[in-house]
Amino acid sequence: MEIIVDDEVKEFIKAEGLDYRLSTTCSGPALVPVLIKPAKESDLKIPIDENLTLYISDVQRHFVPRITIDMVYDPEKLYSCSALSALRGLY
């Protein structure tokens, strides 16, 4: 399955200047900087430009056909997830 990345997401990642990862959180898939949720070897890698990459978790790559700007993480929702609350303040 080909995953479509909206242009708005590509522009967001370029503006941030950081690699991002579509990861599984307590509230569903979320785009988070790899500083918060590091990429894994099993991730699908989508080049955004020559220096930036969007990683798609192996779990999410089977369910998400399109990456949209509404998937960008909300820090309050992200850190309310017990699995990620210890990462608060890293980014």
Image (spheres, grey):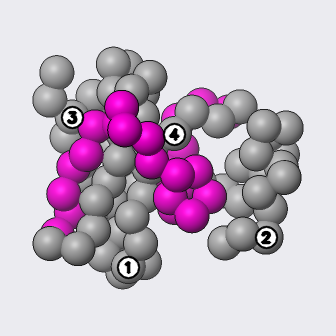
Q: Is residue 46 magenta?
A: yes
Q: Circle 3 is placed at which residue position? A: 3
Q: CA distance from mark 4 to mark 3?
A: 14 Å
Classify the position of the C terminus by image quarter: bottom right
Q: Circle 1 is placed at which residue position? A: 17
Q: Circle 4 is placed at which residue position? A: 23
**Do residues under tags 4 and 3 come within 8 Å of each other at their CB atoms?**
no
Q: CA distance from mark 2 to mark 3?
A: 31 Å
Local secondary structure at mark 1: loop
In which quarter of the view is residue 57 placed?
A: top left
Q: Which residues are magenta?
A: 27-49
Q: Is residue 54 magenta?
A: no
Which residue is at 42% across, 58% downward? 20
Q: Give whichever of 6, 83 is nearer the camera.
A: 83
In the rendered structure, which disc, 4 or 3, sits on the residue that comes first in sequence? 3
User: Disc 2 residue type?
Assistant: Gly
Q: CA distance from mark 4 to mark 2?
A: 18 Å
Which residue is at 52% across, 52% downward? 38
- Which numbered mark, 2 or 3, is in the foreground of this view? 2
**Image spot of residue 21 (x, y percent):** 44, 50
Q: CA distance from mark 1 to mark 4?
A: 18 Å
User: Disc 1 residue type?
Assistant: Gly
**Image spot of residue 58 (x, y percent):** 39, 27
90 vs 43, left or right, is right
In the rendered structure, which disc, 1 or 3, sits on the residue that comes first in sequence? 3
